[in-house]
């Protein structure tokens, strides 16, 4: 028959409300089971003790019987050995009598056929009341209860040997049994013959009797246990069980009171939780709670809307989180470990997350410890604010400000470049004009010297080169794109070393260029200026060193770029990176403006390359930049001069420079 559902629900409700009494019921059941167990244990101990008592009694009875039989046999042999006419001296000198008196015997008496005493030792009045025909018996002597053995003599008469049962008990009873039991020898009427303990049996002890017959007729060996057995309900265990039941009853009463308070607190907590949930859902700030392992334990609706995941999808998740950017996973894990260690900035930090639909968003995160009611930290609570709109506005403002600043800077530099170009073009034009006039005058006069004519021609070339450099720099500063062309890196290096011949005096320069180094697509004038700046920076660091060395190497990197390295054996960069070195207005020189490397980096990046800084092969600093390869020509490129394709060449100021152009005046 099925129980109606309302009745079942009511029964379960009552059972839940009465669950406070369950510990008391369990305590009573436990106490009852312990009582039964103790009772059974007592019975088992009593039975084991009784079995041990029986075994010890039988063992001692066998020991005493063996002893008595041996003594009786000794009496029989003595009766056969004694002569017919025996006196006290003869009896006393007999070895068996001497050993018996020393061992156990009380007296030895020789009787004739008429029961008259022929000899008696030791010298005392003999007791003649012993039954002459009994082999063993017990009689009362003036020294106490004694027993005797009687043996017939071949000449007639009998030999009577008396012994003390107490002495027998002392000699045959082991010490461990004497400590464990009260041992007595009693007759058939219960009269005590000998004992080693209390004369009566105490309550709570066990007793066992075993007959010593035929060694001693009508004699019993009785053993009583010394340890009194106390029932378990008279022991400390019963008191402890009573205290346990009393404490269980008190605990049940306190539990009932506590359950009422907990039920009231639960109702209040539900109300408070509903109110807090309503407040959290009304916030626009995302809230997330994490435990000490980083597991999400709480999120509000604003947080779910922020990342596009539901609370069921987020709660219980461990890092990595689904809203972390895949390409920034390492940074996110590093920030997570820092935050779990308590290293989160107090004023918050910014991060980039990914919405469930795939778009990225910028957030501001503020972390604070999550503490329980006991004051122990159980996790971290974070407040997350979406700052994507603010970041976009800041980025637009920054770009506008940079554009304005760059425009103003370029306008200023353009004006300076235009003024310099305008001012330098006239002297350069005059130099070119005077140079051309001097050449024509010397040619007309017919006194042209080859050395002078060569110097004048190179002077004209340098003037034209200077004009071209001014025009290129002006074009670069006015935001015109570089004019890339096919360039051979060894030739660029050679021209730069020729221009810096005077600065490199006394400094060995090693040029390492592989023969198959491909050409690059670059503006030769601007790249030469980059090389000049890097080499002069290295020379400034090597100033005053007797072992100064420079190394310029080129190598192909991948399929698209050629890298040029400028190494020195100076003090190195001392931990500074390329970003710090190329920061505008940052300089390691006392009189430096901090614009050289910044402009060099701008030039290299304008060529779609990059700059790097590190430790060089000579142990000092290494400044490197990359340039893109030029498109392959339809026809083979002309061969590069051998002096620039040597894989390892040491250049000094005394060695001839490749494609030398200019003179000392142009070097200045």
Image: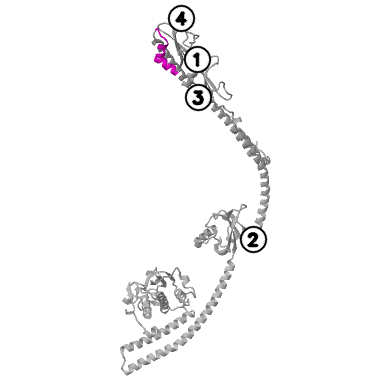
Q: Examine the structure image and report whether residue 543 is included in the region drawn in magenta.
A: no
Decide if residue 23 is on the left or right side of residue 528.
Answer: right
Q: CA distance from mark 1 to mark 4?
A: 23 Å
Q: Which residue does the numbered mark 4 point to in the structure image?
A: 114
Residue 651: name its quadrant: bottom left
Q: Is residue 33 visible?
A: no
Q: Which residue does the numbered mark 1 point to in the structure image?
A: 146
Q: Which residue does the numbered mark 3 point to in the structure image?
A: 178
Q: Position of residue 594 (x, y in %)?
A: 47, 76
Q: Position of residue 14 (x, y in %)?
A: 68, 41
Q: Quadrant of the C terminus?
A: bottom left
Magenta residues? 84-103
Q: Nearer the viewer, residue 488 or 198?
A: 198
Q: Which residue does the numbered mark 2 point to in the structure image?
A: 283
Q: Nearer the viewer, residue 557 or 24?
A: 24
Q: Earlier in the sequence, mark 3 or mark 1?
A: 1
Q: Are marks 4 and 2 in contact (CB under 8 Å)?
A: no
Q: Position of residue 217 (x, y in %)?
A: 49, 13
**Mark 3 Cα-neighbour bin, 10 Å: few <14, some 14–19, many ≥20:** some
Q: Earlier in the sequence, mark 3 or mark 4?
A: 4
């Amino acid at each position: 028959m099925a129980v109606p559902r309302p009745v079942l629900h009511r029964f379960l409700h009552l059972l839940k409300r009465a669950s406070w009494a369950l510990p008391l019921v369990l305590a009573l059941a436990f106490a009852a089971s312990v009582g039964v167990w103790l009772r059974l244990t007592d019975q088992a101990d009593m039975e084991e003790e009784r079995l041990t008592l029986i075994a010890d009694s039988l063992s001692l009875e066998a020991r005493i019987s063996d002893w008595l039989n041996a003594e009786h046999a000794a009496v029989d042999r003595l009766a056969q050995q004694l002569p017919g006419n025996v006196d006290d001296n003869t009896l006393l000198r007999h070895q068996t009598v001497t050993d018996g008196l020393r061992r156990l015997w009380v007296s030895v008496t020789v009787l004739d056929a008429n029961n008259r005493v022929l000899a008696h030792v030791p010298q005392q009045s003999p007791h003649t009341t012993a039954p002459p025909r009994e082999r063993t018996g017990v009689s009362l002597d003036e020294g106490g209860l004694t027993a005797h053995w009687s043996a017939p003599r071949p000449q007639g008469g009998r030999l009577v040997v008396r012994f003390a049962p107490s002495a027998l008990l002392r000699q045959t009873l082991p010490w461990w049994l004497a400590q464990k039991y009260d041992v007595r020898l009693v007759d058939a009427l219960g009269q005590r013959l000998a004992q080693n303990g209390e004369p009566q049996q105490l309550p709570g002890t066990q007793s066992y009797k075993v007959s010593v017959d035929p060694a001693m007729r009508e004699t019993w060996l009785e053993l009583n246990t010394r340890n009194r057995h106390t029932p378990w309900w008279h022991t400390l265990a019963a008191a402890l069980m009573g205290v346990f039941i009393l404490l269980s009853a008190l605990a049940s009463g306190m539990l009932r009171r506590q359950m009422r308070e907990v039920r009231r607190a639960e109702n209040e907590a539900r109300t408070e939780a509903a109110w807090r949930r309503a407040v959290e859902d009304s916030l626009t700030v995302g809230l997330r709670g994490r435990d000490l392992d980083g597991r999400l334990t709480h999120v509000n609706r604003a947080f779910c809307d922020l990342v596009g995941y539901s609370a069921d999808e987020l709660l219980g998740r461990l890092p990595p989180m689904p809203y972390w950017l895949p390409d920034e996973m390492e940074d996110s894990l590093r920030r997570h470990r820092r935050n779990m260690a308590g290293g989160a900035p107090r004023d918050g930090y910014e991060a980039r997350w990914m919405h469930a639909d795939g778009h990225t968003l910028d957030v501001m995160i503020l972390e604070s410890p999550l503490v329980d009611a006991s004051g122990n930290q159980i996790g971290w609570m974070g407040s997350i604010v979406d700052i994507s709109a603010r970041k976009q506005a800041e980025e637009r403002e920054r770009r506008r400000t940079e554009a304005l600043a760059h425009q103003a800077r370029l306008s200023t530099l353009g004006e300076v470049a235009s003024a310099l170009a305008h001012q330098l073009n006239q002297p350069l034009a005059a130099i070119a004009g005077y140079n051309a006039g001097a050449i024509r005058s010397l040619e007309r006069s017919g006194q042209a010297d080859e050395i002078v004519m060569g110097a004048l021609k190179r002077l004209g070339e340098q003037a034209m080169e200077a004009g071209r450099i001014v025009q290129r720099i002006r074009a670069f500063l006015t935001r015109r794109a570089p004019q890339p062309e096919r360039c051979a890196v060894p030739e660029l290096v050679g021209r730069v070393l020729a221009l810096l011949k005077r600065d490199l005096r006394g400094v060995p320069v090693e040029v390492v260029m592989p023969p198959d180094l491909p050409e690059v697509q670059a503006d030769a004038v601007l790249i030469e200026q980059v090389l000049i700046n890097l080499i002069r920076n290295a020379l400034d660091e090597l100033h005053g060193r007797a072992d100064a060395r420079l190394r310029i190497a080129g190598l192909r990197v991948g399929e698209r770029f050629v890298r040029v390295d400028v190494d020195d054996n100076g003090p190195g960069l001392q931990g500074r990176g390329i970003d710090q070195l190329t920061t505008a207005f940052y300089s390691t020189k006392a009189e430096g403006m901090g614009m050289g490397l910044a402009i060099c980096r701008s030039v290299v990046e304008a060529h779609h390359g990059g700059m790097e800084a590190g430790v060089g092969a000579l142990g000092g600093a290494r400044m490197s930049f990359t340039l893109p390869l030029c498109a392959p020509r339809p026809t083979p490129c002309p061969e590069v001069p051998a002096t620039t394709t040597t894989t390892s060449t040491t250049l000094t100021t005394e060695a001839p420079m490749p494609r030398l152009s200019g003179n000392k005046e142009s070097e200045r």
